[in-house]
Image (tube, rainbow, N blue to C red):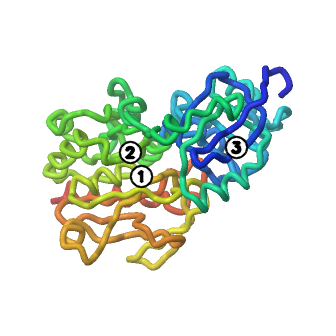
Amino acid sequence: MNGMDTNNGCLVLENGMVFHGVRFGSEEAVTAEIVFATGMNGYLETLTDPSYYGQAVVQTFPLIGNYGLIPEDFESRKAFLSAYITSEICEDPSNFRCQGRLGDWLSAQKIPVLCGIDTRTLTRVLRDHGTMNGVICGSPEEADFDRIRAYRVTDAVKNTTCEKPYTLGEANAANHVVLLDFGAKANIARSLVQRGCRVTVLPAFTKCEEIAALKPDGIMLSNGAGDPADNPEIIAELKKITELHIPMMAICLGHQLLALANGIKTTKLKFGHRGANQPVLNLETKRMAVTTQNHGYQVQYDANDPICSAAADLLYINLNDNTCEGLRYRNFPAMSVQFHPEACAGPEDTAFIFDEFVQMMEVQKCR
């Protein structure tokens, strides 16, 4: 890579497979959960999405970095992923908004990068065998398989949530929304502000009493990283928050946490949904939408389970594997979706969900 210090490196998967390439960024060996993302653009949003905390992201699209570095497109304050794996990183980007080369930024961020490998073959391995752990290191001999197999993503929400509250939007906005930050993408708050909301972003572990004291018109539960079941403290607090009967909307990890708070289980997917081309079906309108997604766990909704059916109705399903993509709750005003209606990057087919949330708040005011 022009202008960067590079070394031979490799990815060693927990099943023993080895992929050789060129390594730069951090020279330290890094163990992570290896996942693939199928987006053809939006690499900056992927790199700065906190939902990738603890993971090494494989880009299936072969050429990454061709429009360079554009800080305005970042979705959070920094890169949270553990490592980045690509076929090729462009050294000569072209875009009128470009402010530098992606490779230089990755090196400055000390993100371990492995490029020059066949990422599509690697993706097929992960698709067929399921998500695996792996280590990026200098040579296969460095791999510690006991450590690789024992690795799991932990403390994800703790390490990605905001440190203190902050507010966005006009002080005299028509609706005040509390956004619980479990590792939120920036465009969630932007989408609410664009619809005339004032948004107070709160750390993930904020207590119900503190939220109630703010007297919000609505509550948003953000996306985030890790196993949702690893957050018992947040789940317990959400049970109290639902009793406030404040209109609520939940996205991705928020969708999973809200389900757990209502007795609905979550399970890990074989290889997850990550990319900007995931089709979902609205079971109420029978309309299909293409969505952006980034998750490795699913809500295990079963209409024949009395706990599930008493808590919520199934609203969206994934057309690839029929997994739960959205719920509408029965006992309090709330809806949740597994996909990202704020997209960024990706299709804006489901941006209307933010309008539905605003309407929920307006209806509640009239009661």
- Give how far apart the Cα atoms at labels 1 and 3 are: 32 Å
Tell me, yes or no, whether the two marked residues, 2 and 3, touch with CB atoms within 8 Å. no
In this picture, residue 4 sits left or right of residue 248: right
- Give how far apart the Cα atoms at labels 2 and 1 are: 7 Å
N-term mark: 1 or 3:
3
- Disc 2 versus disc 3: nearer the observer: 3
Percent x, y for residue 309?
23, 72
Regarding residue 235, the answer to whether it shows in the image is: yes
Q: Secondary structure at mark 2?
A: loop
The residue carrying pointer 2 sits among few (fewer than 14), some (14 to 19) or many (20 or more) residues within 10 Å by Cα, namely many
Q: What residue type is disc 2 on? A: Ser
Q: Which residue is mark 1?
A: 252
The residue carrying pointer 3 sits among few (fewer than 14), some (14 to 19) or many (20 or more) residues within 10 Å by Cα, namely some
Regarding residue 170, the answer to whether it shows in the image is: no
Q: What residue type is disc 1 on? A: Cys
Tell me, yes or no, whether the two marked residues, 2 and 1, touch with CB atoms within 8 Å. yes
Q: Which residue is mark 3?
A: 18
N-term mark: 2 or 1:
2
- Which image quadrant: the C terminus? bottom left
Tell me, yes or no, whether the two marked residues, 1 and 3, touch with CB atoms within 8 Å. no
Percent x, y for residue 178?
30, 40
Q: Which residue is mark 2?
A: 222
